[in-house]
Amino acid sequence: MRKGQINKYIKKAGREAARAAMSVCIAAFLISIHAQATNGNIITTGFNSLYNVVASIVSNIGQLFLLWGVFEMAASMNTQDGMAQSSAFKRVGGGLIACIAPQIIPLINTGN
């Protein structure tokens, strides 16, 4: 009998904890905090620095793909396997696009 009462108490405590957690989650979504941005440069600077980090990562990955594609293309030129040559050219093209993309995106955004 004692084990059954302990199990009931644990289940009841679990339900109460779940209700409390749900209440806190709902309150966090429903309570809105009004924040007024007085200086837009702070936000723009943050996004620009994030863009620079992501752009450098994409460019570095593109350089790796480009090198990998060049070495694979050189190896596939010795064979007559068309699929290997095709995938090497695709990898070189993808690497070039990834390398050049961070420089092209600002041009597209400004419209120049």
Image (tube, rainbow, N blue to C red):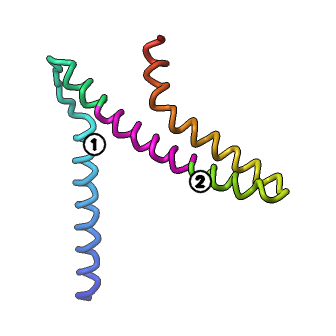
The number of numbered discs placed on residues in the rendered structure image is 2
The image quadrant of residue 28 is: top left
Percent across and percent down for residue 37 are: 17, 20
Under mark 1, the amino acid is Ile
Q: Secondary structure at mark 2?
A: helix
Q: Residue furthest right?
A: 80
Pinpoint residue 23: horizontal percent, then vertical percent.
24, 47
Left or right: where 77 falls relative to 70: right
In front of the other: label 2 or label 1? Answer: 2
Q: Which quadrant of the figure contains the N terminus?
A: bottom left
What segment carries the magenta color?
A: 49-66
Residue at the spot x=63%, y=44% of the render? 92
Q: What is the quadrant of residue 31 in the picture?
A: top left
- Residue furthest top in the image: 112
* Magenta-drawn stretch, dominant element (helix, strand or loop): helix
Please determine whether, in this image, residue 52 is positioned above or below residue 77: above
Decide: is 43 above or below 66: above
Q: Where is mark 2, residue-wise?
A: 68
Identified at 83% across, 52% down, the residue is 82
Q: Nearer the viewer, residue 75 or 14?
A: 75
Question: Magenta includes 69?
Answer: no
Does residue 63 appear to the left or right of 91 in the view shown?
A: left
Residue 34 percent across, percent down from the top left: 17, 24
Mark 1 lies on residue: 26
Q: Could you say which is closer to the camera, residue 65 or residue 40?
A: 65
**From the viewer's perspective, is residue 101 above or below residue 21?**
above
Who's the residue at 70% across and 45% down the image?
A: 89
For the residue labelled by badge 1, is the local secondary structure a helix, a strand or a loop? helix
Packing grade of label 1 (10 A; few <14, some 14-19, many >=20) is few
Sequence-earlier tag: 2 or 1 = 1
| Separation of marks 2 and 1 at Cα, in angstroms | 50 Å
| Amino acid at circle 2 | Trp
